[in-house]
Image (tube, rainbow, N blue to C red):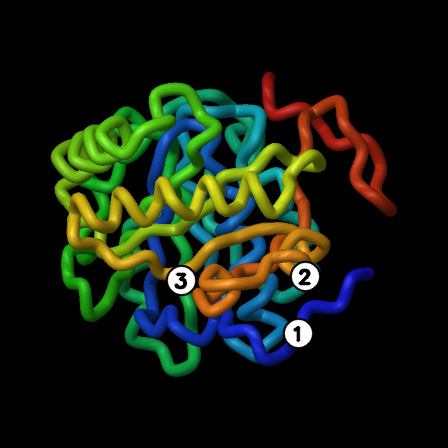
Amino acid sequence: MVEVSPDRPTAYDILEAPVTLLVGHFGAGKSEVAVNLAFGWRLRGWDVTLVDLDLVKPYFRSRLLRTEMEDAGIHVVLPEDDRVFADLPIVAPGARAGAGLAGRVHHKVLFDVGGSDVGARVLGSVPGLGDPKTADVLFVVNGNRPFAETAPDVVRMLRDIERASRVTVTGLVANTHLIDETTPEVVDAGMRLAQDVSADTGLPLRFWAASPEVVAQVDGPTAAIPVLTLTRYITPPIGWRMGAARRRSSVV
């Protein structure tokens, strides 16, 4: 495994709110960021709860890592029994209590929210998420997604999500990638897009995300911005993950 300098600032250093919500375009990488943050905080000794509110995209949801997360001591909130893989607009009762966990000492709560304004609308049914002192609402910017190639496109979706969800975005995450073909040049292009969105909205760029191999190659101004080093946990239903059996499809 590629070693990344311990001197680099990380997402864990700057995400101080007890609750973190991840919103953005379809396929922007919200679930992967959420799962990595969950495992990362758990490894750092935090109690962690992940609330899966992705009700619109069945193939890439954080709930597919439920067993691995629970084995690591992460509490996962999602529909129970045979409804866990159902492609239905089901909001688990525990989701509405998720924000209330913010008062617990040394506890982090993550909300993995569905894509675009359609997926974010569910946040309107979860009370207690509007206080920026309690909740960071992070918009994941991925310039390689349809309708997200330019800053005006991204800003338009960001505002649509705010209107639909009735919460206010507090920061940006740069997550432009090409999966295994990601290069430092791809990351740099994504950073420029995220910085343009930041300039247009006044929202801070909180951190960027990439694999450890790519992180180790990136230098210059980007290296000074907090980073989330990603392990790729979520794969297509027909795919394989290292050391694991074929994953069950999320379609029933």
What residue is shown at x 42% (from left), y 59% (from top)? Answer: 207
Give the mark nearer the N terminus: 1 vs 3. 1
Q: Which mark is residue 216?
A: 2
* Left or right: 249, with 10 as reference point: right
Q: Nearer the viewer, mark 3 or mark 2?
A: 2
127 to 2, vertically: above or below = above
Which quadrant, please, contains the C terminus?
top right
Q: What is the x, y in percent for residue 248? A: 72, 28
Q: Are marks 1 and 2 in contact (CB under 8 Å)?
A: yes
Query: Please, what secondary structure does the residue beneath circle 2 have?
Result: helix
Give the mark nearer the N terminus: 3 vs 2. 3
Q: Neighbour class for label 2 at 10 Å: few (<14), some, many (≥20)?
A: some
Query: Please, what secondary structure does the residue beneath circle 1 have?
Result: loop
Callout 1 amino acid: Ser
Residue in the foreground of this view, choosing between 74 and 196: 196
Q: Neighbour class for label 3 at 10 Å: few (<14), some, many (≥20)?
A: many
Residue in the foreground of this view, choosing between 151 and 74: 151
Q: Which mark is residue 109?
A: 3
Callout 3 amino acid: Val
Residue in the foreground of this view, choosing between 102 and 207: 207
Q: Nearer the viewer, mark 1 or mark 3?
A: 1
Q: Is residue 94 visible?
A: no
Task: Give the image quarter of residue 136.
Answer: bottom left
What residue is shown at x 26% (from left), y 27% (from top)? Answer: 153
Q: What is the x, y in percent for residue 148? A: 36, 27
Residue carrying label 1: 5
Spatial CA span between label 3 and label 2? 29 Å
* Left or right: 52, with 243 as reference point: left
Q: What is the x, y in percent for residue 223? A: 52, 65
